[in-house]
Amino acid sequence: EALKHYAKPGLHVHFVSNIDGTHIAETLKLCNPETTLFLVASKTFTTAETITNANSAKAWFLNAAKDEAHISKHFAALSTNAEEVAKFGIDTKNMFGFDSWVGGRYSVWSAIGTSVAIYIGFDNFEAFLKGGEAVDAHFTSTPIEENIPIIGGLLSVWYNNFFDAQTHLVAPFDQYLHRF
């Protein structure tokens, strides 16, 4: 939702991560099996929530498609585990891998960001990546007294340790970040 302004018209993207079957069931009601692409994002392809949802999506899809051969046209994997991807039924030609040291679902900068790239388009995604690169450059080259990520981290420790603050507030001022 935070990137809604950059979305390609007519393209609908849904993210399902809750192991509660209601979430995927409600999401699948919004989808057409003939035009839906599932991107299953799991570093190991063994994460319980991800595989449970992927199996639900596969069952829903096969109920309409009736032929497992069609899985290769509607499912892709974002993973480091080709063996588990193949076991699931996804052709490893449809697997976008990344280095094993990359932090799974949280690394939008790797193949995990494929859904974002599709949603906002590759020009916008490239600009997004350049923004991340600029923050990295700031962090690695800016003196500590002017380094925003370091100051933010130190303030978080300070308020936790000296003021017993148990929470950390991020207050976005953009409506598209209202769920953040």
Image: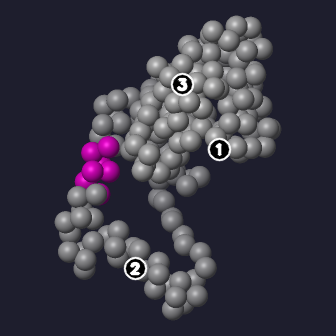
Type of amino acid at the residue the image marks with label 3: Ala
Find the distance from the CA under tag 2 to the CA under tag 3. Answer: 40 Å
The numbered dot on residue 97 is none
> Which secondary structure, mark 1?
loop
Type of amino acid at the residue the image marks with label 2: Leu
* Position of residue 98 measured from the top left corner of the image (x, y, whole percent): 41, 39
* Position of residue 112 measured from the top left corner of the image (x, y, whole percent): 47, 39
Tell me where residue 110 sits by quadrant.
Answer: top left
The numbered dot on residue 47 is 1
Give the magenta-colored segment's residue range. Answer: 129-135
Is any part of residue 1 visible from this angle? Answer: no
Mark 2 lies on residue: 154
Type of amino acid at the residue the image marks with label 1: Thr
Viewer-closest of 112 and 32: 112
> Which secondary structure, mark 2?
helix
Above or below — where is 104 with respect to 84?
Answer: below
Question: Is residue 109 shown left or right of residue 103?
Answer: left
Q: Quadrant of the C terminus?
A: bottom right
Find the distance from the CA under tag 1 to the CA under tag 2. Answer: 33 Å
The residue sitting at 34% across, 73% down in the picture is: 150
Callout count: 3
The mark closer to the camera, 1 or 2, is 1
The residue sitting at 25% across, 79% down in the picture is: 145
First-in-chain label (2 vs 3): 3
Mark 3 lies on residue: 76
